Amino acid sequence: MEAVVFVFSLLDCCALIFLSVYFIITLSDLECDYINARSCCSKLNKWVIPELIGHTIVTVLMLISLHWFIFLLNLPVATWNIYRGSNCPC
């Protein structure tokens, strides 16, 4: 069970890192005026909820599998993602 949790966590973290890079690239395109603000917001807003779900799943899995230290490390970021997702107008 532990191996499955950690493999899933690794794959999920890779996807979250990819999303973070995508956010940075999109925001740099906005800064350089390659895209307008409305286009940037529509591109980024559709990925807020999947990012929230991905990070929350990893946090809950660590809680269920009794990995307390990793759960406590993930808890502030999961809390921030829930706060950000609850304020999303999408």
Image (cartoon, rainbow, N blue to C red):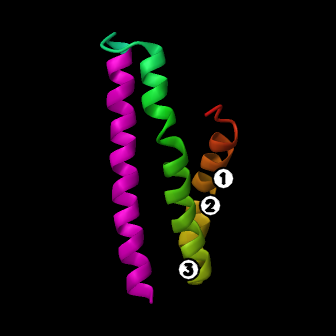
Secondary element at tag 3: loop
The segment highlighted magenta reads 1-30
Quick one: label 3, few (<14), some, or many (20+) residues within 10 Å? few
74 or 38: nearer the viewer: 38
| C-alpha separation, residue under disc 2 versus residue under disc 1 | 6 Å
What residue do we see at 69% from left, 36% from top?
87
Name the residue located 62 percent from the left edge and 60 percent from the top edge.
75
Q: Position of residue 51 (x, y in %)?
A: 49, 50
Marks 1 and 2: in contact by CB < 8 Å?
Answer: yes
Q: Which residue is mark 3?
A: 67
- The answer to whether any part of residue 69 appears in the image is no
Q: Amino acid at mark 2?
A: Leu
The prevailing secondary structure element of the residues shown in magenta is: helix
Q: For this view, does 66 lie left or right of residue 45?
A: right
The image shows residue 13, relative to residue 71, as above or below, that is above
> Dot 1 lies on which element?
helix
x then y, percent, for residue 29 = 32, 20
CA separation in Å, label 3 and label 1: 18 Å
Q: Is residue 53 left or right of residue 31?
A: right
**Mark 1: few, some, or many residues within 10 Å (few <14, many ≥20)?**
some
Can residue 20 be seen at all in this image of the molecule? yes
Q: Determine which residue is flagged by label 2.
A: 75
Q: Nearer the viewer, residue 32 or 76?
A: 32
Residue 58 is covered by the magenta coloring: no
- The N terminus is located in which quarter? bottom left
Specify whether residue 7 is painted magenta. Answer: yes
